[in-house]
Image: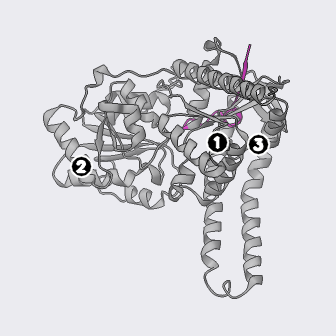
């Protein structure tokens, strides 16, 4: 029977992370035991040039001290990366002025100093992670042997990875390589990303475009974008030898643990009976939180008592927005922000809010949309193609160029009590994570088998005597 090797390296080493890709990887991996009809599905990681079978994705409760330490290190790492990036931003700006513009030696010295500063931030974190790996109480992954007919599915965020030579070696041995693509935002909208990420992602996509046998995206919209980008880089002839497909994500919150509770400040706010509009996402420019502030400021000026609540961890390039929030006169009155809610609290917020408002400029899928709608919470979202794919006529769409278009929809909803979408939420349904995992497995297996059959027929025709 066909074996799918589902790669989850980053989540394996950072099980405490619970946003975006990490949430997808964890849920897919955890549901693999239930979707073995089409293939034997094996979670794997890469380590020191070897491939290991994962027996346990996250540490046991006895290892919680290690998880807490890792979580603290992760937060520290994010801060250090931000500081490091500021160093390089300062470096790029200084080059325009004297004496840097006049002297190569001054440029060189400044570059070396920036490199040393960057290294001083990352070295302690690297050494600490290595120590944590050595003192792990019980190994959670063991080295395994691959077979020529295996299919390696790169499910995790692999653009920062160092296992590319190992993957290429497996491919030479006959293993098919499939890349899961979440979005192409660093390529299509680099203005929303940190400079280093744009460069790293571009190099990674160049590698994956040349290496992968097929691509499976998390939406039809992204599948088409990937096809176009690969075709631009490789040309039509080489692109036509690859396959492109997509699957959709699930909707459950899998970390709603009974040992967690809702903090009093959240319970007080969402149990107040106020009309609360949620924005659930990492706080970074692409998510367009500033648009919401513009729209709700218009509502507040007109005397409305609606409440805006941001939920999500701190991201990047958000200094101006955070400053605006902290100095806002409506903060803790009609404007709230929570950066560290657990799934129990997020579930509570979804259940007690009036609507989700989601003004992203660009998305690969939009996981909060299905999480909210699956719980009966209606959604107002930006008028972009992928949201139409996911939400169809059940979502109310607003114009990103006009914050007043969202304000008008909210006023209409508040005044009439009727949500301004073409179809009512009661007729909407979506996949769960088991369905999502099964869809991924079935489509990958089908596409790889079709590709091998086509290649076999082409090979026979090539070698058929005239």
Determine whether the residue tagged by mark 1 lies in a helix, strand or loop.
Answer: helix
Question: Which of marks 2 and 1 precedes in the sequence?
Answer: 1
Determine whether the residue tagged by mark 3 lies in a helix, strand or loop.
Answer: helix
**Neighbour class for label 1 at 10 Å: few (<14), some, many (≥20)?**
many
Image point (44%, 31%), residue name: 345
All told, the count of numbered labels is 3
Q: Are marks 2 and 3 in contact (CB under 8 Å)?
A: no
Residue 3: in magenta span:
yes
Q: Position of residue 280 (x, y in %)?
A: 42, 40
Q: Are marks 1 and 2 in contact (CB under 8 Å)?
A: no
> Quick one: which residue is furthest to the top in this view?
37
Determine whether the residue tagged by mark 2 lies in a helix, strand or loop.
Answer: helix
Q: Residue 388 is drawn in which quadrant?
A: top left
**How was the colour assigned to the protein in this rendering?**
one colour
Answer with left or right where residue 463 lies relative to residue 79.
right
Q: Is residue 127 above or below residue 141?
A: below
Question: Label 2, on which residue?
Answer: 405
Question: Label 1, on which residue?
Answer: 239
> Is 156 in front, or is 216?
216
Image point (34%, 22%), residue name: 428
In this picture, which residue range is highlighted in magenta? Answer: 1-20
Q: Is residue 180 above or below residue 207?
A: above
Answer with left or right where residue 313 lies relative to residue 447.
left
Image point (44%, 56%), residue name: 322
Question: Label 3, on which residue?
Answer: 129
Residue 265 seen in this snapshot = no
Residue 354: in magenta span:
no
Which one is closest to the eye, mark 1 or mark 2?
A: 1
């Amino acid at each position: 029977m066909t074996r799918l090797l589902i790669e989850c390296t980053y989540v394996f080493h950072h099980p405490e992370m619970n946003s975006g890709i990490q949430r997808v990887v964890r849920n897919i991996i955890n549901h693999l035991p239930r979707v073995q009809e089409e293939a034997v599905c094996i979670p794997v990681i890469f380590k020191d040039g070897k491939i290991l079978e994962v027996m346990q994705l996250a540490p046991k409760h006895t290892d919680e001290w290690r998880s807490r330490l890792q979580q603290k290190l992760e937060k520290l790492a994010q801060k250090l990366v931000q500081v490091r990036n500021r160093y390089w931003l300062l470096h790029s700006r200084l080059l325009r002025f004297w004496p840097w513009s006049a002297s190569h030696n001054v440029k060189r010295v400044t570059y070396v100093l920036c490199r040393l500063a960057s290294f001083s931030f990352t070295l302690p974190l690297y050494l600490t992670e290595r120590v944590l790996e050595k003192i792990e109480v019980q190994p959670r992954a063991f080295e395994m042997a691959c077979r020529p007919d295996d299919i390696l599915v790169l499910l995790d965020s692999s653009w920062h990875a160092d296992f590319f030579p190992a993957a290429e070696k497996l491919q030479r041995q006959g293993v098919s390589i499939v890349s899961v693509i979440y979005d192409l935002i660093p390529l299509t909208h680099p203005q929303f990303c940190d400079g280093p990420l744009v460069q790293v992602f571009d190099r990674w996509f160049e590698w994956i475009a040349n290496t992968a046998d097929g691509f499976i995206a998390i939406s039809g919209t992204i599948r088409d974008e990937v096809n176009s980008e690969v075709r631009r880089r490789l040309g039509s002839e080489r692109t036509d030898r690859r396959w492109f497909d997509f699957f959709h994500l699930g909707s459950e919150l899998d970390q709603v643990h009974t040992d967690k509770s809702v903090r009093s400040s959240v319970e007080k706010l969402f149990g107040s009976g106020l009309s609360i509009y949620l924005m659930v996402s990492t706080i970074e420019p692409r998510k367009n939180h500033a648009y919401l502030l513009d729209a709700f400021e218009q509502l507040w000026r007109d005397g409305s008592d609606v409440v805006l609540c941001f939920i999500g961890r701190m991201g990047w390039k958000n200094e101006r927005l955070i400053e605006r929030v902290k100095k806002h006169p409506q903060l803790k009155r009609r404007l709230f922000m929570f950066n560290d809610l657990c799934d129990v609290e997020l579930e509570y917020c979804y259940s007690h809010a009036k609507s989700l408002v989601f003004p992203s400029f660009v998305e690969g899928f939009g996981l909060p949309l299905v999480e909210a709608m699956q719980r009966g919470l209606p959604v107002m979202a930006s008028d972009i193609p992928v949201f139409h794919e996911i939400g169809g006529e059940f979502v109310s769409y607003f114009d990103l160029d006009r914050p007043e278009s969202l304000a008008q929809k909210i006023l209409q909803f508040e005044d009439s009590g009727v949500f301004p979408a073409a179809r009512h939420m009661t007729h909407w349904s979506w996949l769960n994570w088991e369905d999502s995992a099964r869809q991924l497995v079935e489509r990958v297996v089908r596409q790889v088998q079709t590709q091998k059959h086509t290649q076999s027929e082409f090979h026979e025709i090539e070698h058929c005597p005239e």
